[in-house]
Amino acid sequence: MRCARTPGCPGVVDADGFCEVCGLAPRPARATRPTAGAPVGTETWPVAGLVSLPVRDFTGHRRTTAGLTVPEHERFCANPACRREVGRGGAERLDHGYCPHCGTPFAFVSALAPGDLVAGQYEVVGYLARGGLGQVYLAEDVHLDRKPMALKRLISKTEPDALAIEVSERQFLTTLDHPNIVRIFNFVSAPDRLFGGQTSYIVMEYLEGMPLHELWQAAVDPTRPAVTLPLVEILAYGHEILTALDHLHGKGLLYTDLHPGNVIRTADRVKLIDLGGVRRADDRHSPKVRTETYGVSPTELAAHGFTVRSDLYAVGVMLRELSRPPLDSPGRDTALGAESFGRLVTRAAHPEWRRRFASASEMSEQLKGVLRELLPAPPADRAQEPSTVFAPTAALLDAGLGAVPALAAWTDPAAAEAPHHGRPAPPSVATGLPVPRPAAGDPATAALHLIGALDPGSLLARLAAFETASVEVELSRCRAHLELAGPGPAQEALEIAAGLLREDAAADWRLVWHHGLLALARSDVAEAGERFDRAYAELPGEVAPKLALGYCAEQRGDAGEATRYYRAVWRRDRSAASAAFGLARLRLADGDREAAVQFLDGVPRVSRHYDAAQVAAVRVLATRLGDDPPGAEHLNEAVRRLDRLRLDGGARHGEARDRMTAVLRQAALDRVLAHGAAGLAAGGTLGDAPAERSLRRLLERSLRDLARQARTANDHGVLVDRANAVRPLTFLRAR
């Protein structure tokens, strides 16, 4: 029977229902669809410290049979390059033998039967499964309380490729001890009933569970084609798989044959099984064991062989397969986390070798970032897990909205007349976004850590002392020139960095990020958005690219897209106050003053930007929206909040509090002149009788207080003139 699971797959489904090319079984009829194990009470098992999956009972799910029988019409050579009919022909039909076209062994009957005792220790219970070159049986260890074991047998000891795979397993697998990799306990030999002589069996841990492709089938309801495994669950499985691969890669080994049929979901674990393809990373001669649909192109194999990136390619393809139907189908989460998942698997399975993740740990970090986006928002006071690729920044992208207005707000006519929207200019954002951490392999990284934070001029002087060519030095030089408003020298530094990277330059996300910063410095928001979108594709689990994209969308006037990015950042990381300010600006632009204040109030007390957010909330409550002054309820709330602000180092009186008081008194007077004093509460900043005459006297007093802060005679004169202009008219009684 031809495979119907993967479009275009040339494979044939064997007797167990698994395609020998893509490794997937056909979708079963609803009546026979497997059912995932039932949850075991409220027990859970944690994954990545982020999510807990239910412990499930798979007892008895895997059914054994007395033996293997393959109908004649389903008998094909297991070699994907051959796929000829074998073992057919009526009276000349063979149940086992060698393909006459390529010599690949085949066996369409089992070599063991229930009750057989292998090596005097393992009693066969029944047949479990069949792969391209082997058969797997369930057995019990009669020397160990009849503990269940899995026996894997290669079809023929005399077939060279099979022997090479067996030797590979003997050499590598006995040393592997990882919770996400099936355990290998023993290697034994027994008479070979099919091909004669002796054959070897690998004694493995028996796992009660379901392969991931069966779990996917169990989740899919034919009557609701848009429903599939939750992305959170898929990502949790992906994390466990990457943990196992990272263990293998750390030992200089590659898996080479990852697909959903080779991953088992047990009660409280995900495990890699069928490790016949495991090989040393520098092995270019052993036979290739791979599943075509989940493998890289023949061209890449010819150029690079199996690599860490080819293993990660298979992870990306598998996660994408498990997430079907498409991410944009009805019923699928449309939040940014779903898009981030799509970008994660796209990068992992990128056709260009250099564009993929370089290690399992690198992909795992991005996967965890995507997982955080899909989970409920954490408590506001919980510290965000620090990024491994971006250093935290103390900058707040607020254009001073979170600061007490400077004296220029009263002495500079342009600043005095324009309401403060809080959106920073692109060049200031270029120097305020997070900075990539120096790469561990760069020769200057250790020295750059020692230098620490310096003003840009001093930094450039230090960087000039480096004699060794370094990408990180050039990137630091680029950022220093951006702070000094020198986009030309910044671009020159990036060109030098690209030259040092050579063929890796096109795939280096650090260059992409810095080109985005350079575009902002030149106020080219469209170019910056394209660069940051590329950075998002390379780093789908990071906050920084989404914050940058949110700003670019806001600057373009695309409020919906800006809100989408800012929300994704804000719900994941409450320390990212720049996102809260961005959301507040967007709500303020819509005339929703209350919603803007709510976002600012969401900045937690533990944040370094908490006081700035509280100052901004008071300013938002007191600012004009268009030509309309704030309402009485907004001014009353602003007055209450002003009293709670921590200003002037905590002192009850000081220059900052005087300036904020002047802001509120001016706003109250504007309100009274436009709509009267109805609704304004008496007391505090606005005085006991908030009528026009009273407010004029209070504002006059505030402006004279500000005049004492002036540092120039001109500013002092401007403030005194403003105080005189606002004071109420007085009338002399005629004598």
Image (spheres, rainbow, N blue to C red):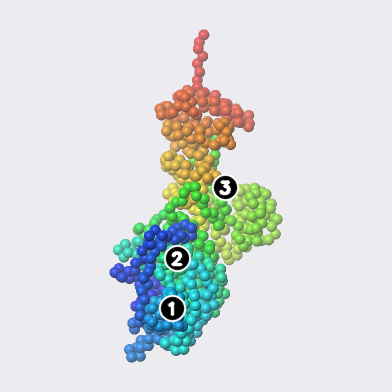
- Mark 3–mark 2 Cα distance, whole angstroms, equals 40 Å
Q: Which residue is mark 3?
A: 394
Image quarter hosting the N terminus: bottom left
Give coordinates of residue 310: x percent, y percent.
50, 70
Q: Amino acid at mark 3?
A: Ala
Q: Secondary structure at mark 1?
A: loop
Instruction: Mark 1: give few (<14), some (14-19) or many (20+) Cα within 10 Å.
Output: some
Asked whether disc 3 touches disc 2, contact meaning CB atoms under 8 Å apart, the reply is no
The residue at the point 54 percent across, 28 percent down is: 702
Task: Return the disc, 2 or 1, that comes first in the chain's sequence.
Answer: 1
Estimate the x, y position of residue 646 in percent, counting from the top left. Answer: 54, 37
Mark 2 in CB contact with mark 1 (< 8 angstroms): no
Question: Tags 1 and 3 in contact by the CB under 8 Å rule?
Answer: no
Q: At which x and y percent is residue 166?
A: 50, 80
User: In front here: 706 or 231?
Assistant: 231
Residue at 51 percent across and 77 percent down: it is 169
Which of pointers 3 and 2 lies earlier in the amino acid sequence?
Answer: 2
Q: Earlier in the sequence, mark 1 or mark 3?
A: 1
The Cα atoms of the two marked residues, 2 and 1, are separated by 27 Å
Q: Is residue 76 above or below residue 4?
A: below
Which marked residue is nearer to the observer: mark 1 or mark 3? 1
Rendering quarter of residue 81: bottom left
For badge 1, the amino acid type reads Val
Q: Which residue is mark 1?
A: 142
Residue labelled with disc 2: 269
Q: Nearer the viewer, residue 697 or 197?
A: 197
Q: SS for tag 3? A: loop
Query: Which mark is in front, 3 or 2?
Result: 2
* 29 relative position to 238: left or right: left
Question: Given this view, does label 2 or label 1 mark the residue nearer the observer?
Answer: 1
